[in-house]
């Protein structure tokens, strides 16, 4: 495993909810990342994020890590939950809030 | 073959389709950072019995796998996906 893959593993396993996105939740740099961050914020739990635009290694590495070709990507409890479309579907159905709350509580 | 046609043919080659819509939304995103590399924004609505009993993430993976090397920044920057079974439509 490369150093980048190891770093990503530590990030996703060390944070119950972590969003890989372009920009930050305050200053998103892409509409899809913006929507994903807003949906997470709407769930009322704290979440970590990584701005992939600040690290080209992570930007490519996260696509390889979960075999998922696009950004944003949401990891919950160490597992890839999905990209923007799945995040929005789960947000609208209420499943996202349940999933992130459960992961946050089990990490405490 | 334009990119919409390429997306259609790749999905048709990999997945059993009962209905398929491919839409090029690139004009909605012209000029933003992600579009600089030349990649387009596309929307697909795929209806397939192959999705039966699959989670959303597994359905999206099937479509991404069908796209293969086209999921690069300079070709397809973003692909919005609706993946449904015939019963869900």
Image: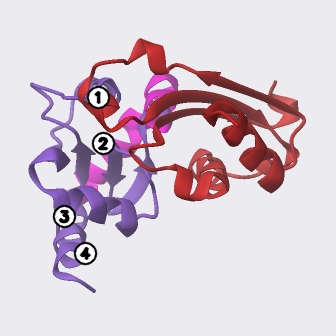
Chain colours: A purple, B red
Residue holding disc 3: A57
| Circle 4/circle 1 CB separation < 8 Å | no
Front disc: 4 or 1 = 4
- Asked if residue B65 lies left or right of residue A20, the reply is right
Q: What residue appears at the point 43 percent right and 28 percent down from the top-left corner? A: A91
Q: Earlier in the sequence, mark 3 or mark 4?
A: 4
In three-dimensional space, the C-alpha distance between marks 3 and 4, rounded to whole angstroms, equals: 9 Å
Front disc: 3 or 4 = 3
Within 10 angstroms of label 2, few (less than 14), some, or many (20 or more) residues?
some
Q: What residue appears at the point 74 percent right and 38 percent down from the top-left corner? A: B8
- Count every numbered label the image shows and give the total: 4
Q: Is residue A77 above or below residue A48?
A: below
- Asked if residue A34 lies left or right of residue A90, the reply is left
**Extent of the magenta region:** A86-108
Residue holding disc 4: A5
Circle 4 sits in a helix, a strand or a loop, which is it?
helix
| Circle 2/circle 1 CB separation < 8 Å | yes
Choose between B68 and B61: the one closer to the eye: B68
* Same chain letter for marks 3 and 2: yes
Within 10 angstroms of label 3, few (less than 14), some, or many (20 or more) residues?
few
SS assignment for the magenta stretch, majority:
helix
Q: Quadrant of residue A28?
A: top left
Q: Which mark is residue A101?
A: 2
The chain to which mark 4 is attached is A
């Amino acid at each position: 495993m490369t150093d980048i893959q190891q770093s990503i593993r530590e990030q996703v396993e060390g944070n119950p909810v972590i969003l890989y996105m372009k920009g930050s939740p305050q200053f998103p740099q892409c509409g899809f990342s913006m929507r994903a961050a807003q949906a997470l914020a709407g769930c009322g739990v704290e979440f970590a994020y990584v701005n992939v635009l600040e690290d080209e290694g992570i930007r490519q590495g996260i696509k390889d890590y979960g075999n998922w070709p696009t950004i944003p990507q949401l990891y919950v409890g160490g597992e890839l939950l999905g990209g923007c479309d799945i995040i929005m579907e789960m947000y609208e159905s209420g499943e996202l809030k349940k999933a992130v709350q459960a992961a946050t509580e089990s990490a405490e | 073959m334009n990119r919409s046609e390429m997306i259609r043919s790749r999905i048709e080659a990999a997945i059993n389709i009962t209905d398929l819509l491919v839409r090029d939304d690139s004009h909605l995103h012209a000029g933003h950072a992600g579009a600089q590399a030349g990649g387009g924004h596309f929307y697909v609505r795929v209806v397939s019995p192959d999705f039966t009993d699959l989670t959303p993430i597994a359905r999206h993976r099937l479509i991404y796998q069908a796209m293969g090397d086209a999921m690069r920044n300079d070709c397809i920057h973003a692909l919005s996906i609706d993946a449904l079974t015939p019963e869900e439509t």
